[in-house]
Amino acid sequence: MEFFKQHKVSIIGAVIGILAGFSLGAYWYNVSPKRAEAPEKTTNTETISNTDGKVTLSAVDESAMIAISDQQAGDVVLVNAVALGSQGWVAIREGNAGQLGNILGARRIDAGAWSTIAVELLRGTEAGKAYFAVLYKDNGDSEFDHKTDSLIEVAGKTYMQPFMAQ
């Protein structure tokens, strides 16, 4: 009992540290991309149901797919699912009269199928505005550069998926 009285502050600090560690671990687990089951291969754009409402799902070819839904404005955008045949990037860009505007943030994605990807933004989205989730093919240096990493295109059209901030 005497030991606990002498080390009360240390014990309380250790308990708080352990609880903080578990909390940060749980947060990291929830925002880290998760390996998903490989999506059904398709070359169409279709709408699928999600618990949040409707989610737009687009597939470029058998090696690329992205799904995103409208979401709350903020400093992080959650992409529902991404599939890439090789390492690439998912970038969030402003919409500018239906065209691609400024890049707000990007996250590297390894080849494969992923779900719940959090893309941290340098500048947050604003309610009522349109944005795009865009796939880029990495040039091999694992550094995002919109000038050297190429947009994924099909038939000369940039592969992008629109969404709204609410």
Image (cartoon, rainbow, N blue to C red):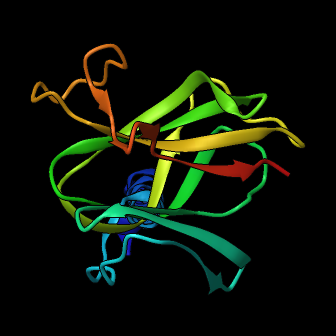
Q: Using residue 159 as the reference point, say whether residue 68 is left or right of it.
A: right
In x, y percent, where is residue 51? 68, 85
Q: Hey, which quadrant is residue 76 in on the image? A: top right
Residue most toward the right?
Answer: 128
Residue most toward the left?
Answer: 140
Instruction: Looking at the picture, tell me which residue is in the foreground, 24 or 75.
Output: 75
**As displayed, is residue 127 above or below residue 14?**
above
* Residue drawn at x 21%, y 33% as measured from the top left: 138
* Residue drawn at x 57%, y 27% as measured from the top left: 104
**As displayed, is residue 101 above or below residue 151?**
above
In x, y percent, where is residue 112? 20, 65
In x, y percent, where is residue 116? 46, 66
Q: Number of labelled discs?
A: 0
* Residue drawn at x 70%, y 52% as measured from the top left: 163
In x, y percent, where is residue 106? 43, 34
**As displayed, is residue 61 above or below residue 40?**
above
Q: What is the quadrant of the N terminus in the image?
A: bottom left
Q: Hey, which quadrant is residue 70 in on the image? A: bottom right
Instruction: Looking at the picture, tell me which residue is in the foreground, 58 or 31.
Output: 58
Q: Using residue 165 as the reference point, say whether residue 122 is left or right of it.
A: left
